[in-house]
Amino acid sequence: MSHFAEINSQNKVIRVLVGDNNDPAGDEGYQWLLDNLGGTWIKTSYNNNIRFNFAGIGYSYDEARDAFIAPEPEGNIGFDEATCQWIMPKVEPLGN
């Protein structure tokens, strides 16, 4: 299975669909998406093999990093360029 994210003009993901790896065109369904749904589609990987993170609705596509990035969470302490993920503070478990 291949997965594609549709982005809007602000590079925000608005939907993610599954493509057909057996598509006769050999493009995993990419051309079908363009022909039938229009829009701008970018391949994403459920296993994070490409573009760092699996795209989700509300994520942003950063062209410079070629990465899907989750919305910035409240309380984050930075951004990890190596993984394109937000860094959250470590929470120590409460004592017994």
Image (tube, rainbow, N blue to C red):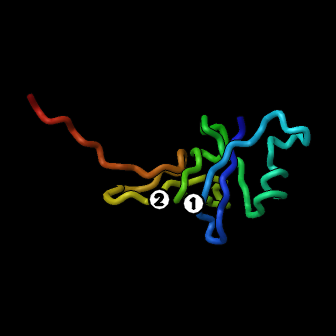
Residue type highlighted by circle 1: Ser
Please state the horizontal and vertical placement of residue 52, each as a whole percent of the image.
60, 45
- Name the side, left or right, on which 70 lies relative to 75: right
Q: Residue 71 carries which label?
A: 2
Classify 22 as above or below 4.
above
Q: Which mark is residue 10?
A: none
* Observer-nearest of 37 and 51: 37
Q: Which of marks 1 and 2 is nearer the N terminus?
A: 1
Q: Which residue lies furthest to the top in this view?
A: 96
Counting from the top left corner in percent of width and height, residue 34 is at 81, 57
Report the front residue among 31 and 11.
31
Instruction: Identify the residue at horizontal 21%, vertical 38% (top origin).
Output: 92
Q: Looking at the image, which is closer to me, 92 or 17?
A: 17
Give the residue displayed 62% in from the left and 60% down from the top. Answer: 62
Residue that badge 1 annotates: 60
Residue 26, position as x, y percentages in the image: 88, 39
**In the rendered view, would you say 16 is above or below 7?**
above
Position in image of residue 43 (x %, y %): 71, 48
Q: Say whether residue 25 is left or right of residue 11.
A: right
> Do the numbered discs 1 and 2 sit on residues whose CB atoms are within 8 Å?
yes
Q: Which quadrant of the figure contains the N terminus?
A: top right
Q: Is residue 39 left or right of residue 88?
A: right
Specify few, some or many for label 2: CA neighbours under 10 Å numbering under 14, 14-19, or 20 or more. Answer: some
- Check disc 1: other Cα within 10 Å, few if <14, some if 14-19, many if 20+: many
Q: In which quarter of the image is the C terminus?
A: top left
Looking at this view, name the residue that lies furthest to the bottom: 9
Count of numbered marks: 2
Residue located at (50% from left, 54% from top): 70
Q: Which amino acid, by three-letter code, is at mark 2?
A: Pro
